[in-house]
Amino acid sequence: MRQKLMVANWKMHGNLATNKQLLEAYIEKLSPLNYLQVVVCVPYPYLAQAQSMLQNTNIAWGAQNISKDAVGAFTGEVSAAMLKDFGASYVVIGHSERATAYCESDENIATKFMQAQTHGLIPILCVGETLIEREAGVMQMVVAKQLDTIINLYGAAVFANAVISYEPIWAIGTGLAASAEQAQSMHEFIRGRIAKLDQAAAASLKILYGGSVNPQNAVQLLVMQDIDGGLIGKCSLNAQEFEGICRAAA
Ligand code: PGA
């Protein structure tokens, strides 16, 4: 059995004072839930705060992006090693909000994925299709291409120590989550594609679902065989709602 994983993606929200409150509530409400791993991905400036507040808890922390380069003259970038310096263990890679706004190519995302692994961070690779692609019935093709860029460069074994988050772009922040069947079908497809190349990596790989998960729809999604947890945006900013989602993983 793969242990469930719930990742809070705070995006560009919060400040020192509100983060403190939210992290205190996370610690109180979520650390007793020992049947799942909870991770919070904070904006860069708050990594030190996450580290100091979470270091003696069972809640892990991470960031929402890294540079594709290891070190050098890259103004404004943050490296994987810098995240490690703040005790981070996870990093979101290729979130569609970034990929679209900052024109990140699949190749770029693959390089970041490898940067994370090289520096001992677990990459949470986001994949998913647009509404137009879903309506055209090409969603599996789109996701396959996103996966294959990494597989072709580094092999399928890299997924043994990674997380994939299936995030249909039409479901992110829209209040319109994928149905449990739609999500399960894509998760099964993703696991199957990796299993063809590396059965062990596919079996241990955690595949999260992200996109308008809330305490009401969480159970339906999380009972599906290939859904190993969630990447939670909006509802992770409210400790009670996030707790509701985490409890659904039981
Ligand atoms: P949402 O965001 O939960 O607000 O839809 C999910 C995500 O962006 O990962």
Image: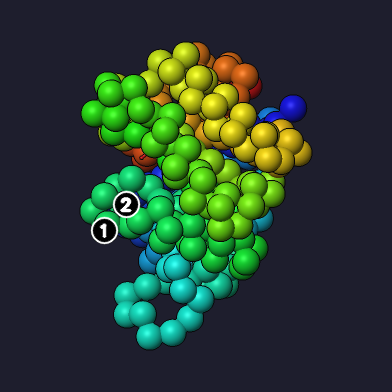
Residue 130 falls left or right of residue 152: left
Q: Which residue is mark 1?
A: 102
Quadrant of the image occupied by residue 90: bottom right
Ligand 1 - quadrant of the structure image: top left
Residue type, numbered disc 1: Tyr
- Asked if the beta carbon under badge 2 is closer than 8 A to the nearest atom of ligand 1, the reply is no
The residue closer to the viewer here, 7 or 75, is 75
Task: Give above or below for 167 relative to 160.
Answer: above
Residue type, numbered disc 2: Ala
Residue 43 position in % (x across, y down): 38, 58
Confirm or deny contact between disc 2 and disc 1 (CB under 8 A): yes
Residue 17 falls left or right of residue 117: left
Q: Is residue 1 visible?
A: yes
What residue do we see at 50% from left, 44% from top? 147
What residue do we see at 43% from left, 58% from top? 107
The residue closer to the viewer here, 218 or 148, is 148
Q: What SS does tag 1 mark?
A: loop
Q: What is the number of the mark on residue 99?
A: 2
Q: Quadrant of the C terminus?
A: top right
Quadrant of the image occupied by residue 17: bottom left
What residue do we see at 32% from left, 80% from top? 75
Task: Give above or below for 221 relative to 109.
Answer: above
Residue 236 position in % (x across, y down): 41, 37
Task: Give above or below for 55 relative to 76.
Answer: above
